[in-house]
Image (spheres, grey):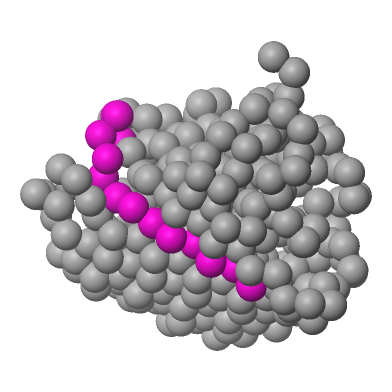
Amino acid sequence: MTSFVFSSRTTSRQRWCAPIVGGMLIAASAMQPAFAAASDIKALYNVTFAGFLIAKGTLGIRLKGGAYAAKVQISTSGLARIISSEESEASSRGSLSSSRVIPASYDLYSKGDKITEVDMKLRGSDVTKVRAYPQLSQADDRVPVTAASKRNVVDPLSAVVMPIRSADGAFDPDACDRVLPIFDGWTRYDIKLAYKDRVAVESDGYTGDAVVCSARWIPVSGHRANKKSTLFMQDNRDLEMWLIPAADASVLVPYKISVKTMRGTLQVVATRFEGADTTTTQAAK
């Protein structure tokens, strides 16, 4: 889900589906060997803006035999339903190699004031087919989306499959040391993560540590270079992603995402986990 949150686009076309995480929502980086048995991860999230509840989301991930499948659903909630009612659903599938996540398909459908759809197919991390509606508007400062922009990428929802590089490395600084090359159907951008802290957290289904990663949004193509929101997000230092380990799987999943926007702070926070590793030791206070 993470990557949706980091997108510079606004309103219903901000593609709320997946960070939680995005957007987040995802990793072309080292992965542990394929899992012999199925591992199921489920999480519930609250989305707040400027302190007000605006949406609720569910995230499900299944890892089995070198393959993964993920699904996220988000709907407006609280005061936001008075202004607009929107429901979004995204799903992705792919395989796990010894070195990375390799997405094969990504689908998004969002309905509200407008309909938003993406149907994308990938092979070897390269986009082979994409249909995205609505189309990007024409603008003189729009950076063209080239064929190169759609190679060696992951979709936004696959971004929530975050590999742990070693058996005891869930909270090592290098757990955050990665760049997520994301293509969402319209735009290509990178999310650059870096280690910031390790903190104790608690929610229904998980009590333990979270690794805190700072994040940077780096536009590559499809964005409007001179738009205020693009310039703001490029320079934005108030982005964080908190990650926790999942039981029986060598992955981290989002516990919290926090993004400062031009109009206030957007936060995605987990309220419940099934399949999270509850045996981790809390950070020293």
Q: Position of residue 9 (x, y in %)?
A: 36, 50
Whole-percent x, y for residue 14 in the image: 35, 55
Look at the image and give the residue range highlighted in magenta.
Answer: 49-62
Picture residue at 38% right of the left edge, 70% below the top = 89
Name the residue: 51% across, 56% down.
Answer: 43
The stretch drawn in magenta includes residue 268: no
Residue 170 visible from this viewpoint:
yes
x%, y% of residue 251? 74, 56
Q: Is residue 58 magenta?
A: yes
For residue 8, above or below residue 58: above
Q: Nearer the viewer, residue 12 or 49?
A: 49
Horizontally, residue 20 falls left or right of residue 198, namely left
- Magenta-highlighted stretch: main secondary structure? strand
- Report whether 65 appears left or right of 10: right
Q: Give the number of marks.
A: 0
Q: Residue 225, can we see it? A: no
